[in-house]
Image: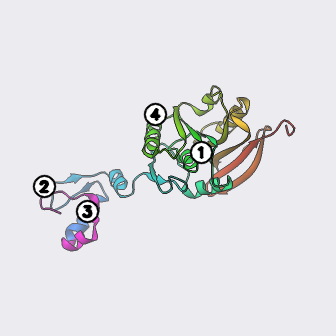
Amino acid sequence: MLDGICPTVPEILEPSNIVLRSWRHEISSIQRMLGILVYSPLCRGTASIRISNFQNIRYGAQMRITSGILRNRRFEVPSEEVRPTMESVREAIFSSLGGKCEELKVLDLFAGSGALGMEAWSRGADSVTFVEQHSRVSSILQNNIQSMESEDLGKTRCIKADAVTWLARVGESFDLILADPPYDLPNAFSDTLNGIAEHSVLTADGILVYELRSRGSIEIPDSWKVLRDKKYGKTRVLKLKLNSEEES
């Protein structure tokens, strides 16, 4: 590190720098860094660094894809607006689906960061449609997808719309629907399932994977059959299928 150049936050915490510089200065710098300001004796003045910026530099708001063509590729998560499905839960979800999504037409409702849809995309989905209403989140989602596009992957499209109202006008069916709405969104479960059923958005043999809060009770509409109901800490994942005409 050159004299007169202000070090970055990681440099301040680098063990080699701590050894080379006065421990009193280092302790003082770290204390201020965990508060509002960071001071380095090699800087001319005081560098103002917010805690949130420090956290982003150290850790980053990112997650990774767990399997498939894009395995271990990282994508941005707009942490203030969304609650992305954790890696362990995503692995469990796709394991229950057989691990692969080859030739499937996939719909990711309430897409958020796109974690679920990109997982299906990486695992061979023929196409993935992402539906997200929030402007900033939708923009980050599109950037995530564009950064990973490859000739080896299926087609994608991002639609900025309210997921439930979009179901009424989509006019097509999907083999796999992934839905992870905000836990506190009123009537999200019933509105989503009813919208999918009423507008034939799921194919006859298609699967709906729905993520919700583990606590609390829900009522399953008569037109649906639960194939799997699993809890992962605070998260509950339902795997559902539409009843056939004989079962209705």
* 2 and 1 marks in contact (CB < 8 Å): no
- Labels 3 & 4 near each other (Cβ < 8 A): no
User: Distance between the Cα atoms at labels 2 and 1?
Assistant: 54 Å
The correct choice, above or below, for 135 with respect to 216 in the image is above
Q: Which residue is mark 2?
A: 44
Residue for point 54% across, 56% down: 66
Is residue 205 among what the camera can see?
yes
Q: Report the residue marked by disc 3.
A: 11
Q: Are marks 2 and 3 in contact (CB under 8 Å)?
A: no
In space, the residues marked 2 and 3 are separated at their CA atoms by 16 Å
Say if residue 109 shows up in the picture.
no
Residue shown at the point (42%, 51%) measured from the top left? 61
Q: CA distance from mark 4 to mark 1?
A: 26 Å
Crowding around mark 4 (Cα neighbors within 10 Å: few <14, some 14 to 19, many 20+) is: few
Q: Is residue 24 left or right of residue 233?
A: left
> Which element carries disc 1, helix, strand or loop?
loop
CA gap, disc 3 and disc 4: 35 Å
Q: Mark 4 to mark 2: distance in Å?
A: 40 Å
Q: Amino acid at mark 1?
A: Ala
Residue type (three-letter) at the residue carrying disc 2: Arg
Disc 3 vs disc 1: which is toward the camera? 1
Mark 4 or 2: the one toward you: 4
The region drawn magenta spans: 1-23
- Whether 9 is among the magenta residues is yes
Q: Residue furthest top?
A: 169
Which numbered circle lies on residue 125? Answer: 1
Specify the amino acid type for callout 4: Ser
Q: Within 10 angstroms of label 2, few (less than 14), some, or many (20 or more) residues? A: few
- The residue singled out by tag 4 in the image is 135
Q: Position of residue 106 (x, y in %)?
A: 62, 41
